[in-house]
Image (spheres, grey):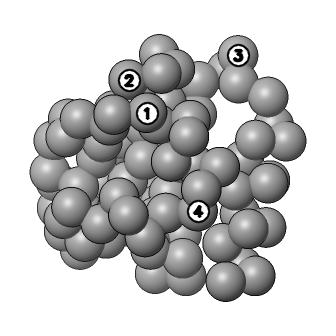
Amino acid sequence: MQCWIYRSSVRDGLYVWLNKEDALDTLPEPVRRQLGAAELAMSIELHPGKKLGQEDPEVVMANLDAQGFHLQMPRNIEPDVLQAALDAHKHR
């Protein structure tokens, strides 16, 4: 599975993984606010068992399949930001 990883310009360590290139406009508003002017960090091919620095590839792929994105959050971000973003995306 091909994915594109964008880096937040607002919060260090916050990345969003997308299942479609340049699909930032499809993200829930709370996520877009946290990203600011997101910048493409890299594009990679994901598969089960692929070694990733901080993320579980199977969780990333499941999120990409289910909602089109995966958030890689820094440890200092409030958990309710993620929950609000996911709730908003579900109710579209």
Question: Quick one: 47 or 62, which is closer to the camera?
Answer: 62
Closer to the chain start, of discs 1 and 4, is: 4
Which of marks 4 and 3 precedes in the sequence? Answer: 4
Does the rendering let one see residue 13?
no
Residue carrying label 4: 28
Residue at position x 55%, y 82% from top?
66
Mark 2 or mark 1, earlier in chain: 2
Q: Going from the N terminus, do you reach mark 2 or mark 4 first?
A: 2
Q: Disc 1 marks which amino acid?
A: Gly
**Pointer 4: residues within 10 angstroms few (<14), some, or many (20+)?**
some
Q: Residue 2, position in %: x, y?
A: 19, 68
**Residue type highlighted by circle 2:** Ser
Residue at 50% in and 48% down: 32
Say left or right for 39 vs 61.
Answer: left
Which of the two labelled residues, at mark 2 and mark 3, occupies the earlier sequence position? 2
From the image, tell me which residue sits under label 2. Answer: 9
Q: CA distance from mark 3 to mark 4?
A: 21 Å
Residue 78 image label = none
Q: CA distance from mark 2 to mark 1?
A: 5 Å
Q: Which residue does the numbered mark 3 point to in the structure image? A: 76
The residue depicted at 79 percent of the width and 54 percent of the height is 84
| Total numbered badges shown on the rendered structure | 4
Between circles 3 and 4, the one closer to the viewer is: 4
Mark 2 in CB contact with mark 1 (< 8 angstroms): yes
**Tag 2 secondary structure:** loop
Q: Nearer the viewer, residue 53 or 43?
A: 43
- Percent position of residue 17, x then y: 37, 53
Q: Is residue 82 left or right of residue 50?
A: right
